Image (cartoon, rainbow, N blue to C red):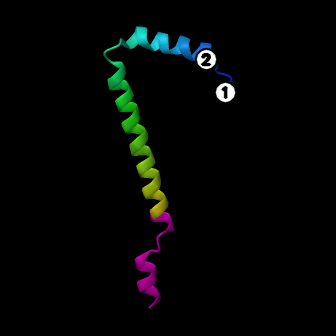
Amino acid sequence: MFGIGVPELIVILVIVLIIFGAGKLPEIGGAIGKSIKNFKKSVRESDENETAPDSKKIDEKK
């Protein structure tokens, strides 16, 4: 995974823990999770809009 191993991940987690503190980590994790969820939802809605037939075009053909 991009050349990042276990030791590098541990160092990154320790630095994040030092910067934000143990109390903020659940809030940060929740915010990141909500962001990912909203991004996936918007992509899914975008795909549905592109694949659905346009009702105006169907009405114009009649």
Spot occupied by residue 49 in the image (x, y as percentages of width and height): 45, 64
Residue at coordinates 36% horizontally, 38% vertically from top-left? 34
Residue situated in front as seen by the camera: 17 or 35: 17
Q: Which residue is mark 1?
A: 2
Q: Which residues are magenta?
A: 49-62
Q: Is residue 36 above or below residue 62?
A: above
What is the count of numbered marks? 2
Residue at image position (46%, 63%) is: 48
- Farthest top residue? 18
Category of crowding for the residue at label 1, using alpha-carbon neighbours closer than 10 angstroms: few (below 14), some (14–19), many (at least 20): few
What is the crowding at mark 2: few (fewer than 14 residues within 10 Å), some, or many (at least 20)?
Answer: few
Q: Quadrant of the N terminus?
A: top right
Disc number at residue 49?
none
Indicate the quadrant containing the C terminus: top left, top right, bottom left or bottom right.
Answer: bottom left
**At label 1, which amino acid type do we have?**
Phe
Position of residue 42 relative to residue 55, above or below, is above
Q: Which disc number belongs to residue 6?
A: 2
Q: What residue is at 54 percent from the left and 13 percent from the top?
A: 10
Q: CA distance from mark 2 to mark 1?
A: 12 Å
Q: Secondary structure at mark 2?
A: helix
Q: What kind of residue is marked 2? A: Val
Residue shown at 41%/50% (left/top)?
A: 41
Which residue is farthest right?
3
Residue 47 to residue 15: above or below = below
Q: Decide which of 10, 18 is in the foreground and name it.
A: 10
**Percent x, y for residue 37?**
40, 43
Q: Position of residue 8 (x, y in %)?
A: 60, 14
Q: Answer whether residue 53 is magenta in the image.
A: yes
Q: Main secondary structure of the magenta part?
A: helix
